[in-house]
Image (cartoon, rainbow, N blue to C red):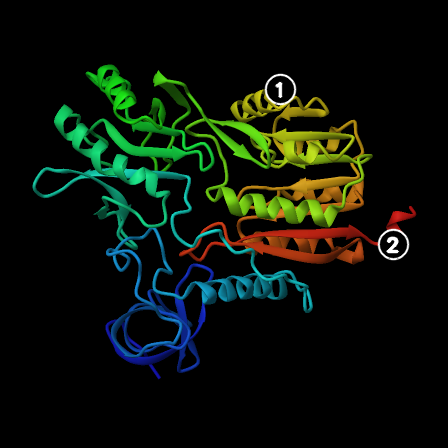
Amino acid sequence: MMWRQGEVIELEISDLSDTGDGVGRFDQRVVFVPDTVVGDRALVKLLHVKPKYAHGQVQDLLTASPQRIRPSCIVADKCGGCQWQHINYDYQLIAKQNQVKQALERIGGFINPQINPVLVAASPLDYRNKVTYPLGISATGQVQAGYYHKGSHKLINLNQCPVQDQRLNILLTEIKLDIQKQGWSIYDETQHKGLIRHLGLRIGRRTGEILLTLVVKDWNLPGIENQAQQWLQRYPQLVGISLNRNSDRTNAIFGSQTRCLAGVPYLRETFANLEFQICPDTFFQVSTETAEALLDTIKAELNLQGHEVLLDAYCGIGTLTLPLAKQVRHITGLELQSTAVEQAIINAQNNGINNVTFQVGAVEKILPNLEIIPDIVLLDPPRKGCEINVIKTLRKLKPFQIVYVSCKVSTLARDLKLLCEDGLYKLTKVQPADFFPQTAHVEAAAFLTLSENDKSN
C-alpha cells in the first residue's frame, strides 16, 4: 500500500522512541508521532514520508492512554524544552528503563542485562539548576525569552518554567523588562545582527546563590555596568553578573570569553558534602540531587577500601573526582578544557583534598602515555561517547573495574560492546538515573569487571 504525505491514518501508539516521540506501526511501517504515549489511539496526519517510516502529527485523539495526564506547563504543547509533560511520571521512569534495555540489547548485543530501576528525581518539576534562554522580539516589539517551538526556531515566550528552580522565575520575568528599558538590541540569527543572544541563569540548589549571564555578540553594551550593579542590589541571592561573548554564526550558546561585571564570577554549591565553585559556563549536572544519588550508587557498588588508584577520564571540575578522592589512595583526573581543570584544582584546594592530580588534554591522547596503572577507571564522556583509541587503550591497561557514566545510551551500548569483546569485561549492572524529568533523556552508569581469566594475567 502506498502512503502519501498529508494522508490521515488511524494509529495506536505501542512504544516511545529515544527522542521522546510515540511510535506506532501502520502497514508494517513505523510512524513517529510527538505528544503521544503508549496506549494512545489517534488520527495521525503523515508529514514526512519515507519508504520505511514516517513522521506524523495528531489530528484527533480517539482514545487517551491511561498514562496520559494534563501537562503542568501551559505551553507544553508548543515549547520544545520538554517532550513528556503529558506523560505520567511513573511511566516516564518505566520508559527510560526500557530505553536503556533496548539500546543494550539491540546495539550492544547484551542478553538480559541487569538494569536497576531508574533513580527517581527528588522532584519531577522544579529541578533544573541551570537554564539558558534564547532571546527574541515579539510582533509588538517586546523582548521575549523562552525555548523554541518544537521543530523550529520560533520562540515561545516564558515568564515561568515548571522544570527550572522556581527561585529563578522572578529573574526570567524582570530581566527581560530591564533589557527592554535599556534599549539593547536582540540578536537576529538570520541576519547575524543585534547584541544579546541568550539569558543564562544558574543557581546553587543548596546555597541559593544565583549567577546571571548575558551572552552577547560583542562587548559593547552601553550602560551594562550600572545595570549589573542595580541587579546585584535588587536580588539578594544574585552573587554575580557576567557577559559571555559569542560572535560566531553558530548554534553553540556560549563563546570562549566571559567577563564578570559585578559580584563574583562563580557561585558556591554544596555537593556530596563538599563545596564547589561553579562558573557561568562550567559543566555541572543540571539535577544536583539526582547526580548525588548516582554518585552514592557508584560508591556503594565500588566498595572502595582506601588503597585503590583511580582514574577519572573526562573529569570536568571534579564533580565525581573529589568526592571519590576521600575513599582512595590516589585519583587522577583527565579533562580537555583547561578552565575546567583550573576550577577542579581550586575546588580540591578549598576542600583540603591533596591526593588528586589533574591533567589537561584529550583523553585519547593522554591515556596511552599515563605513568600510572589504575585499578579503577571512571568514564564520563560527552554524548558522542569515547574515542576508539580510549577503548583500545583501556583494553590494554585492563583495570579491574570500569564505571561508564553516559548521557546517551546508544553510544554507551556501542562502547560497552567494544569493551566487553571476547569476554574481556563483564557487564555486571547498569544504573539509570533521571537527570531530566519531563524529557526523554536518561543518564546511566554501567559497571564492568575484568574477567577472572584476565585478572590473573
Q: Is residue 448 visible?
A: yes
Position in image of residue 175 (x %, y %): 23, 31
Q: Is residue 82 above or below residue 208?
A: below
Label 2 close to label 1 by CB (< 8 Å): no
- Tell which residue pokes out farthest to the right in this image: 456
Mark 1, other Cα within 10 Å: few <14 / some 14–19 / many ≥20: few
Residue for badge 2: 452
Q: In the figure, residue 115 lies in which quadrant?
A: bottom right
Q: In the figure, residue 164 lies in which quadrant?
A: top left
Position in image of residue 49 (x %, y %): 33, 69
Residue 349: image tag: 1
Give the amino acid at mark 1. Gln
Q: Is residue 187 visible?
A: no
Q: Going 56% across and 32% down the picture, which residue do you hit? A: 316
Q: In the figure, residue 358 lies in which quadrant?
A: top right
Quadrant that contains the N terminus: bottom left
Rounded to the nearest angstrom, the CA distance separating label 2 from label 1 is: 39 Å
Q: Nearer the viewer, mark 2 or mark 1?
A: 1
Give the amino acid at mark 2. Glu
Mark 2, other Cα within 10 Å: few <14 / some 14–19 / many ≥20: few
Earlier in the chain: of badge 2 and badge 1, it is: 1
Q: Going 42% across and 24% down the picture, which residue do you hit? A: 256
Position in image of residue 174 (x %, y %): 21, 34
Q: Is residue 287 above or below residue 227?
A: below
Mark 2 lies on a secondary structure that is: helix
Horizontal side, residue 56 vs residue 18: left or right: left
Horizontal side, residue 267 vs residue 152: left or right: right
Mark 1 lies on a secondary structure that is: helix
